Each structure stands twice: as C-alpha cells, then as structure tokens.
Amino acid sequence: MPQKITLFTLGGTIASTTADRADGARVSLTGDDLVRSVPEVRALADIEVRAVRQVPSGDLRMDNLVELARAIEESLAGGSDSVVVTQGTDTLEETSFVLDLLVKDERPVIVTGAMRNPSLPGADGPANLLASVRVATSGLTQGMGAVVVFNDEIHAARLVRKRHSTSTAAIGSPLSGPLGHVVEDVVRIFLKPPGRLTVRLPPTAPDIAVGMVSIGFDDDGRLIRHAAGAAYDGLVLAAFGGGHVPASVVPALESLSRAIPVVLSSRAPAGPTLRRTYSYAGGEIDLIRRGLIPSGALDAVHARILLQVLLMAGVERPEIAAAFEDVLTAQGPRMIGRAERVNRPEPLTSAAARPPSTAHEERGNA
Ligand code: ASP
C-alpha cells in the first residue's frame, strides 16, 4: 500500500507566479498546482493536499502555526504516515522551529519552499518538493522533530538558517551542517540530533510579544531603553560575539531583565554564547549575574521563538533557562509546560499563602 502524506500549503515563492513581469510575483498557485508540477510525487505516495494559507511567509502569525501544529497532529493521528509543509523561505527558519517545538508526534514533518518562483528558469520548488516527499516516505527523520529539506539537503529545524537572500543554496545549518542529503533518489542521514525538546501549550495560549534587539558598534542602548516601555513580554538580545555589550548599556539591560525575561544571544552568524570567560561590565558573566538568560548555542532568531513559545506555555524563569540549556542537546525526549500553568489564580499577597509551584516537567514519552 502506498504511504499517505498530508501536504499543507502556506504560500511563499514556491506558490508564486508572475502574470506580468512588470508586476512582480504574487502567491497564486494552489497545493494541487504544486503537486501537478512534479508528477513523480504521486508515484511515491498518496498525497492529500490541505491549503492552509496563501501568503508571503512574513505574514504568517504564531496563531496560524499553533493551528497548523494541531492540524498536523490530527492528520498523523488520522492515518497519515508523514507531513510536508510548503511555505515562503523568509521565515521558514522560525516556522519550522515552532512546529519542531509543538508537534509531539514522532512521524516525519518536513518543511520546504523555493528561492526561484515557478515562472523563472531554474525554479527550485519542484525539486525541493520531490526531495521532501522522498525524505518523508523514507521515514529516516522519524523522531528527529521537524526538518527542512532544501537544495537536496536535510536540516534540523532548530539549527537551520536562511543564510542568503537570493541563492538557491540559501538554506543551511551554520552551526552543525546538514543532517543528511538526497542524492540520486536516495535519502541518507549522517547525523542524528541527540533528542528533542517539545512544549505543551494550554488549549488557549495567551498572545505573547517577544522583541529582538541587536547591539551595534558605538550603540548607546536607546532601543533597549525604549523596549522597557513597549510592553514586550520578553526580549532577545543579539549581543556581540560570546554575549557582550558596551558597559554603558548594562544598566538598561539590568532594569529590563528585572521586568521581563531577557535572553542573551549572539549576533555572530553561528556559535554559542559564553558563560564564564569575560567578567568586565557588559561581559557575559556580568550580564548573566544581572539576570540575563544565556541562549546557549541557539541563535537569536531561534531564541526569540523558543522564548515566545515558553511564555505562551506559562513557563517561568528557571525552566526557561533550563529549556535554553537543553534545546539543542537534550538527550531523548523532554516535554515542558502544561495547561494548568497558564490562567493561574491572581497572585496572593502573602508569599506563605502562595500555592505550591505548579512547575512541571516530564522526561520520557509523555
Ligand atoms: N517572500 C517570500 C516568502 O517568504 C520569499 C520566499 O518564499 O523565498 O514568502
């Protein structure tokens, strides 16, 4: 019996065409059009197409992704062997990571897109879709969380970056390299992530806004001071190198991190933030002592998504720090968050009268 794949389509360049060159490309193709453009995929699996959105990926919202994660779990529970998602590449590194965090099912979830739209010579969408279906039917990414298949490479969603604005090789994993590739129709996996972290959201998760600020040379920190009045629920700081800022920015960061979780990440294209190397004012030791949460090896773009999802789950600082510690290196499955932690009762005035923490964390296949 052929395998069953559900193809969820969200728009993006892979589904865009140009009616008139002067007018530019717009999202216009349906999921059925995409499948028709690569007849080989029908020979590999039964494909059920589900059109979710028809938008540039910059217009996707977190609630679209939460709904998509639920729809993916339902389709897998309802008999699909795997899932492929097509969307724009502009935010694919973020959306695929949301699916990685939210979809608990172990079966393959593949995200892909294209850099050249189908009206251009050398359009890459059909090849990316075919490679994605091959990876999906191979079952080889089972248990690895969401992966991105692009330009015949397979990348872990938590590590993948859009590294170039136009190249068909735009998608890569600067920290680790690809997990595997598809060559001559054969799917090969070279590296396996050690485990995975998933987050359980309450049935109705709150809207959470997380900002991201990058520090620059001779920066006086005024954006950080403004962030304090912007009603963010959390902030990710893309700091210099191993997690450093000019000394003059430290007071603003310290006061912000007393109000909301501030995650210390790096603006460098790859590599971890440090913890115990530089103790000068604005060095990572100093910033961590003042309450900033190190992102570990998670880049700022992914750190922003992890912080947003954790806050939606009602997770508090110690667990946020532990999640950043674990997200790339968790051994085996680890789930964070539970519904009861959000919508908690109004805080009581007396610390002694406070109900015991509902902090909850599971290891194993919960
Ligand atoms: N603007 C497009 C999008 O992200 C770019 C792409 O798909 O490559 O929707």
Image (cartoon, rainbow, N blue to C red):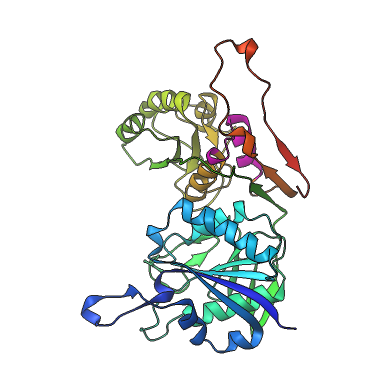
Q: Out of 281 and 113, give the one closest to the viewer.
A: 113
Q: Out of 20 and 181, give the one closest to the viewer.
A: 20
Res 225 quadrant in image: top left
Q: Is residue 311 above or below residue 22?
A: above
Q: Residue at x 33, y 29 (%)?
A: 229
Q: Is residue 129 above or below residue 225?
A: below
Q: Out of 182 and 95, give the one closest to the viewer.
A: 95
Q: Is residue 294 above or below residue 254?
A: below
Res 166 quadrant in image: bottom left
Residue 292 coordinates in the image, percent (x, y): 51, 30
Res 274 quadrant in image: top right
Main SS category, magenta section? helix
Q: Which residue lies most toward the right here? A: 364
Q: Is residue 324 magenta?
A: yes
Q: Is residue 51 above or below residue 341?
A: below
Q: Is residue 355 magenta?
A: no
Magenta span: 311-326
Residue 196 coordinates in the image, percent (x, y): 68, 52
Q: Is residue 80 left or right of residue 85?
A: right
Q: Out of 326 and 43, give the one closest to the viewer.
A: 43
Residue 113 coordinates in the image, percent (x, y): 48, 71
